[in-house]
Amino acid sequence: MTIDSGQHITPLARLRSSDARAYGGKAATLGELLHLGCRVPPGFAISSALWQEARNGARPLRVPEELHRVLLDAFDGLHVRAVAVRSSAIGEDAAGRTWAGQFATKLGVTRATLIEAIEEVWQSPFRAQVQAYATTNGLDPYAGVGVIVQALVESDFSGVGFSIDPVTGDQGTAVLEAVAGLGEVLVNGRVTPDTYHVDKGTLSILRGHQGTQDRQLAADAEGTTWVNHEAEHVPVEMVLDAARMVCDIEAAFGYPVDVEWTFGDDMLFVLQARAITAAGRGHSDRAGSLLGYTLSFVAKGVSVLATDVHMRIYGSYEVVMLQVDGQYEKWSGPNGLAQAAAEGAAFLSDSLKVDALRSEAQAILGTLVETMKEAALRGDLLSSRQSFFRESDRFMTVYKYFNSEFVDMAFVAAPGNESLLHGLKLVTDLKNPLRSVLNAVYFDPSGPLATLVSGLATHTGRSEEDLYSCTSAELLSLAIPASPQLATRRSAYAELLSSDRLVVLSGSDAVRLRQTAVPPTNGGLRGTVSNAPVTRFIGAAYVLDVDFADLPGIARATENMPAGAILVCRVTGPEITEACAKAGAIVNEIGGLLSHAAIISRELGLPCIVGIVGLSSAIRTGDLLELDLVEGHVSIVTEATTEPAEPQLE
């Protein structure tokens, strides 16, 4: 292969917006920023044409040997110890289609690891998450991958600035978020940043909130490392300097922008800038509210740690997981539901992908619980944590396609699609067994997660209650927050994911978010009929709450349940399968045609209505109910009696 490296490896300062098709929008924008006089870390760009050439060869993609010397010379010309290697894919950061951080970024790259880092970025389009994102958003992952190599600033502080308020759309207010150290922790949402709202006219602080950061990410000889200590807060003067820079870039570009910046060596640098998409980068237009979101799951006894682990299922979907006063809820945004339905339908219509998923799921069913428990029991606690969470990620990658947002919504969104229906038939028989694995791993008091937490409690001297209130990243790094902060999380906690940006709230902030939820109304107790072996069923209600912190309590409640009663739940799962088997009918508040209740009711031949808004607040144990299995209505015939009435059916 003969390549003119002079045409494909170019200093950033030579690029302009017209080079976006060759080098990607991110690199072209950096060239424009340099042309405007902004301070940008020095670097060079590699055109997407080289990626296309490499793509024609074998995988994994390799940088041709004849380019090694050219690239290393370009590195030497920067006169730095380490660089950041980022993607600049064709179409990445374009207005309305940002790729939401799907491509790889490598920090702390040295001369010795430069070629390897470029090759890793080149591999990005072949990653499963990129493929899924492309399918969902109708994008071409193979349009081309340019690469940016920039001097790595040893950052004292880093941040992101929005030239308008990304939540309210207020064009007179800039919003700045900042953390100590490198900015990847801000982009990934793993610390709570300092946040300031700035009046753009006067460049004065309107309001501010200092976040909590007991560790920071720093560059070292191995790439990056966590430094555990109480981090400093960003100085107000620096916030105002960054706000001024963001406003200047907005004025030069002529549209609202989202700017990543960093401060090091006593200088403020721009790392990248892009147009704020319709919902704002990293924020839904409802990020501060649950207005328009759908309650898709509810339970008790779900820890902060289990919440954080479960969030890994979602890539760039609008989803909020929160818990207030011990009750866990999952809320799905309208855009997220639409994306998940599209991705689920595309995935389940592909027989090769479905077969691969089934094979992986069956392997997990056979080995995962024991594998994770063995990992949790290892004497080397670092290896133990890494192995546990690696296996956990493996499980969540598979479990994603059995989750209601992907499976149930795909079923609703694509009626009559024969290939989709065939795929659904192949996976639904594994849905409930996998849910049982999830319970065994994360909620069984003698399961793998409990074993890991017990060992870490002994090692760290911290209470298990505190450790269950940590995120997975905090346990991996043992950067465990102070007990009062964790107590605040236990009172109320929320994780919000939108556009691949994770936001964490706790205490009163999480409570305020929950208060914005407006449950939909449907003019009475009416849901979706998921199984109708009869047209009418009358029986006494038995209300059963799912509490993952008290699985033995569920067993006791099941034992006390009268046979033939109408089982009333907010949501069902394998943990109440025995209760379902005793029931005469099942009704629940949350769920669709492929929910656990729907599946098991068909298996057992039981009448079932799902998705009944307001059910749990309207029904008490002992109420005599009439189920209309034609229209999906639930009526209270008489209120609670001491003895359950005999069920009647037609």
Image: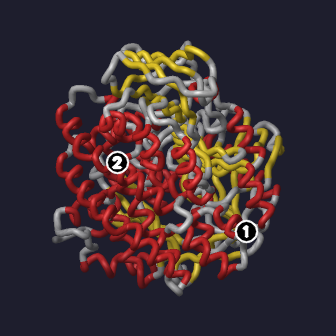
- How many numbered marks appear? 2
Residue 116: x %, y % from top left: 36, 76
Which mark, residue 431? 2
Residue 285: name its quadrant.
Answer: top right
| Residue 121 higher or lower than 332, as above or below | below
- Mark 2 or mark 1, which is nearer to you? 2
Residue 149: name its quadrant.
Answer: bottom left
| Residue 220 higher or lower than 362, as above or below | below
Q: Residue at label 1?
A: 214
Residue beneath the point at 81% across and 60% down: 235
Query: In the image shown, does 551 or 398 lie closer to the viewer?
Result: 551
Q: Is residue 75 left or right of residue 270?
A: left
- Of labels 2 and 1, earlier in sequence is 1
Residue 519: name its quadrant.
Answer: top right
Residue beneath the point at 54% across and 35% down: 570
Q: Quadrant of the C terminus?
A: top left
- CA separation, marks 2 and 1? 39 Å
SS category of the residue bearing label 2: helix
Query: In the image shown, does 453 or 576 lie closer to the viewer?
Result: 576
Q: For the residue marked with disc 2, what is the amino acid?
A: Lys
